[in-house]
Image (cartoon, rainbow, N blue to C red):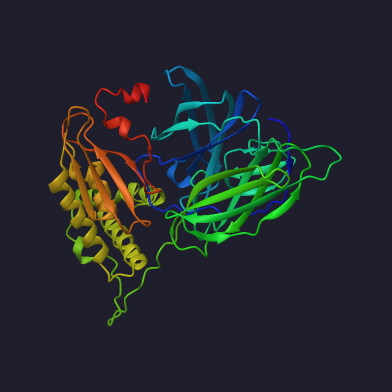
Amino acid sequence: MRKLIYAKFLVIILPLLLSAQVQFVPISVDYASFQQSDTSAYIEVYVSIFQGNLTYRIQSDNVYTANFSNFLEVKDQNGKVLENLTHSYKNTANDTTGMNRFNQFVDIFSFELPYGNYKARIRMVDNISQQKGEYVFDLNTIRHKTGLYLSDLEFCMDLKRSEKKDRFFKNGLRVVPNPRSVFDILQPMLYFYLEINNLPFESGKDKQYTFEYFVTNTSGDTVKTVAPVNKKMIGSCLVEVGGFNVMSLPQNSYFLNIKVKDVSSGDEATARKAFYVYKPQKSVKREQTVSQAVPEIDEAITLLTKEELKKEFQYAKYIASRQEERIFKNLEDANAMRKFLTQFWYRRDKIAGSSYGTFRREYLRRVQEANERFRSMGKEGWQTDRGRVLIIYGEPDEYERHPSSMDLLPYVIWYYHNLEGGAEFIFADQRGFGEYELIHSTYRKELQNPNWQEIIRKKSGFYQEY
C-alpha cells in the first residue's frame, strides 16, 4: 500500500470483558477499503475473538496453549473464488488467571481487488476443541472517482505512531481495529482512521481543506458536534485520524459522520459508519433483613446422588467458566461436588444481588421449561439452541413465527427489548425435523450472520454458495 501523510492521533487500548462460556465461538468481523490504484482497492478484513472463548491445553512445561486458525474466502457475484486465505495462531499463558475476563485477539486479512461488490465468509476453528465460528457478509468496496472522495471509515482500539511493520502497521501508524464497533466503560474511546483521496494539491500553493465530524442517532438527530478545522493540503492523498470519548452518550446505536471540503472549489466528500454504546446496568442489591450464612453444603443438594450432581453442573455449563469446568471435572468425591456447587451458585447470587438459593432455583426452572418445550431429535430441550437462549436470557418479550412457505424454511424470531437496548434471535428449522437452530442474533455476544435470509431460502445452497 502506498505511503500517505498522517495528521494528529490519540492513543489508548482497553480490552473488553467476556464472562460466560459459549458452545460455539462468536467472532466479530468488519472491513474497510482504500484506494490502491485507479482500477483496484486495497481491502482489510478485521476479525476479533475473545481469549476466554478459546480452549487452552496445559503442556508438559506447565504452560497453557491455545491454537486456532482463521479462514477468509472471497467470491465474485458469479461464485468464482478470488481470495482464499488462512492465518494460524498459537497463544500461550503461564496460568489461567483472568483468561476469561480480558484480551481480544485481532486479525487482519489484507489483499487487493478490482473496485466492486463481492461475497465473503470468515471461518474460525479452535484447533484444540474443534469449535467453530462463522460470519458471512457482503464486501462492497469504495469506488474510484475523478474528484475528491474518501475511503471507508475504520474504527480502532489503538492508534499511535509506530515504525514496527507488523500486521497493524499502516502509513507510519500502528492501527489496531475494533471489528465489534461496540464501545463501553472499558473501551470508552472511539478512534477512527480515514484516507482522503484526490485532493487538488499543487506544490508551492497554499491550498486548504476543511475537516469535521459529528455524531447522529438512528433518528438522524445530531447528538455531538466538533467544530470544523481548516487544514493545509500537503499532498493529494492524506490520512485523518482522531478519537473522542463516547461515554457521555446514552446507550444506543449511533453514526459517526465525517465531512471533508475543498475550501477553494467547495467540493465535498462524506463518510459514515455505525457504532454502539453499551452501558451495563448496575445490579441493585436488595437489603436483606436477616444475614444469611452460606452453609458448607446447601441442603437443597445434600441428597443428590453423584450422577445428579454431575447432571446439575452439566446444566450450568452455559454460565460456568472454563476454570470451573476443569475444577469440577477433577472432583471424584460426591461431597466435594456438593461443596463446589454450593459455592458455585452462591457466587451467582452474590453477583445478582439476590438472596441465597434464588439464582439456582430460577436457572433450574428455566432448564425444566426448556426440556418441556424444546426437546427435539433425541436432544433434551436444554441442549437445543432455543433452550440455551431461554436459559441464559429468560423468556423473550415478543415472538414472531413464520411457517414454511413455497420459498422459505420455517423460522422464528425472539425479541428481547431490554437486552443491550434491544436484541433479536433468529432460529430456523434447516433440516425439516422441527429443531430450530440459531442462525443469527443482533446481540453482540452471540452468533452473527447479517445474511441470515439466505439460509432460510429453500434450495439456497447456503453452505456451498453462501
Residue pushed farthest front? 265
Camera-side residue of 65 and 49: 49
Residue in the image at 50% along x and 22% along y: 84
Residue 436 falls in image quadrant: top left
Q: What is the quadrant of the C terminus in the image?
A: top left
Residue in the image at 33% along x and 46% along y: 329
Please state the total of marks drawn on the protein image.
Answer: 0
Would residue 387 be found to the left or right of residue 234 on screen? left
Query: Is 199 drawn above or below residue 298 in the view shown?
Result: above
Residue pushed farthest right? 204
Would residue 102 be found to the left or right of residue 269 on screen? left
Residue 244 in the image: state x and y as whole percent.
Answer: 60, 58
Q: What is the quadrant of the N terminus in the image?
A: top right
Residue 58 seen in this snapshot: no
Residue pushed farthest left? 372
Residue 438 in the image: state x and y as whole percent.
Answer: 29, 40
Camera-side residue of 134 and 454: 454
Residue 354 seen in this snapshot: yes
Residue 162 in the image: state x and y as whole percent.
Answer: 73, 43
Query: Is 352 drawn above or below residue 436 in the view shown?
Result: below
Residue in the image at 62% along x and 54% along y: 243
Would residue 27 be found to the left or right of residue 157 on screen? left
Residue 215 in the image: state x and y as whole percent.
Answer: 53, 56
